[in-house]
Amino acid sequence: MRRRTNCIFRFRILVVAATLLGSLSLNSYAVDSSARVQLNIAKAAPRAVESLTERGILRDYSFAWNSMAQALEFNTFDPLEGPFAGEAKNWLRDTVASQQHSGVSQQYVNQNHQLEAVFYAPEGDVMELHDTAEYQLQVSDGGKLIHEEHVVLHFIVLMTPAADRWVIRQLQAVPQF
Amino acid sequence: MRRNFPIRESRIALSACLLAASLLGVCAAQELTVPASVTAGEETVISTTGSGTATFYLLGPGVSRKNEVSLGQEIHLQARDLQTAGDYLAILCSGTCRSASFYVNAAKPASVTFLVHPSRVPVGQSDAVSGVAFPFDQFHNLVLTQKAINFQLTAGSSSLLSQSVRTRDGVAWFRTASGKAAGTLQVVASLDDLSAKRAVQQVASDPCNLHIQGQRTANGILVETEPVHDCAGNPVPDGTIVTFTATEAGGKDTVDAPIKKGIAKAQMDAAGAVVVSAASGVVMGNEVRIGAH
């Protein structure tokens, strides 16, 4: 009888562990896949974008949007440290501070970014990109959903190389390119 | 930007209206009308319809405002809420929520961010100096309307470049050759009455016509260059390395000597007849023959 109880107990532990692992892996998948970015470097000028740089931009831009989504959803500043600098970081921090005060939060769901490099400085110290971003925007107030819509936004982006990554210095939505 | 009409909200609103209409025989949901576009740092108003009170939200870059408003009256948006260019979302909730979005555009240019490379450049190099300029408004928004930026490069009293370039997507750039004479190159980007100045130090290029002479001394041989210049006649900066190589029957001896006050010199051990040559970078000098002791 005791042995059977142990078996059931172990089975339950196994189920709980499997569920936890499953949810963890699902979560990490969701975080990894939340910002899908496609980069087109064909029009970059006057300097051509090197393949290593292309990979770096893809990685860092995707990471930046994931971080921004986290910051605006949980109203925390930490995710903004690293992927953003200058004016972009300033207004994102202001937004988070303002949301902390108002109790509002934003969720960016199913992000898709069509990114195009349009200017790459001769010395490689700044790149301008156009991003056509598409996502489901959810706005909540105190946890209650007050607004949800599918948006397509155009962003002018300035990125510069930092010590170990490319950072977003300017992120400015515009009506069209 | 395109915003699809929020289907979920409209359904909720419709349901609410139908319920209210069935109960009261009337349905007067709140509406809001936003400006077509706004300039950064300027006040604007959002007009509303309906009656009673509602909760108003303004979400945009750098702002998340929430306050109670009276329906049927204008909502005043202050200049400080609209300083960052971008997309703003206004939401009005009274039972149901209605939303509308608008853009804030950059104001007129107030500064020019100017990146120039390199800070130090050899003379006579093609496409060696480049600059990139971005106009920003007083709130640090990138100005995207086309502007003419004048790039001017001057070395001493001579002008190396004067070029007007129109910004495209908020950026203008140039690339040009370095000048002929060593010295400071002034690089200026100007937009109307705004300007940004940078300096590039032009230095001598590789040595040209490297010429050495040598003589025997009590301890060996002393070799030295004549004053080292580049091909444009600029003195090569002190610290530039000249390599002296002495070849004699017994083998080779090599000494690296930095240029000091325009001349590089080295004391070398050599008892027998020797041939001494010199090189700096990829430039070879003449050879001198010095007899045995």
Image: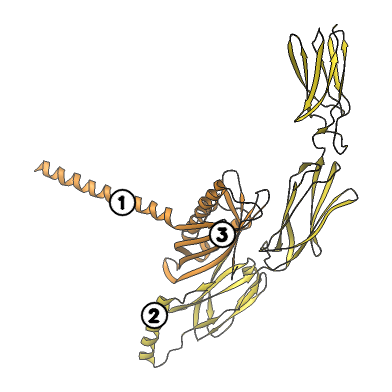
Q: Please state the total of marks drawn on the protein image.
A: 3
Residue placed under numbered mark 2 in the picture = B11
CA separation in Å, label 3 and label 1: 36 Å
Query: Could you classify mark 3 by the number of other residues whose Cα lies within 10 Å: few (under 14), some (14-19), or many (20 or more)?
Result: many
Residue A75 visible in the shown view: no
What chain is the yellow one?
B
Give the mark, 3 or 1, whose residue is nearer the N terminus: 1
In this view, B90 is above or below A12 = below
The amino acid pointed to by label 2 is Arg
Residue type highlighted by circle 1: Gly
- Which chain is painted in orange? A
Instruction: Report which residue position mark 1 lands on.
Output: A22
- State which mark lies toward you, 3 or 1: 3
- Sort mark 2 into few (<14), some (14-19) or many (20+) by Cα contacts within 10 Å: few
Q: CA distance from mark 3 to mark 2?
A: 37 Å
Q: Is residue B187 above or below residue B69?
A: above
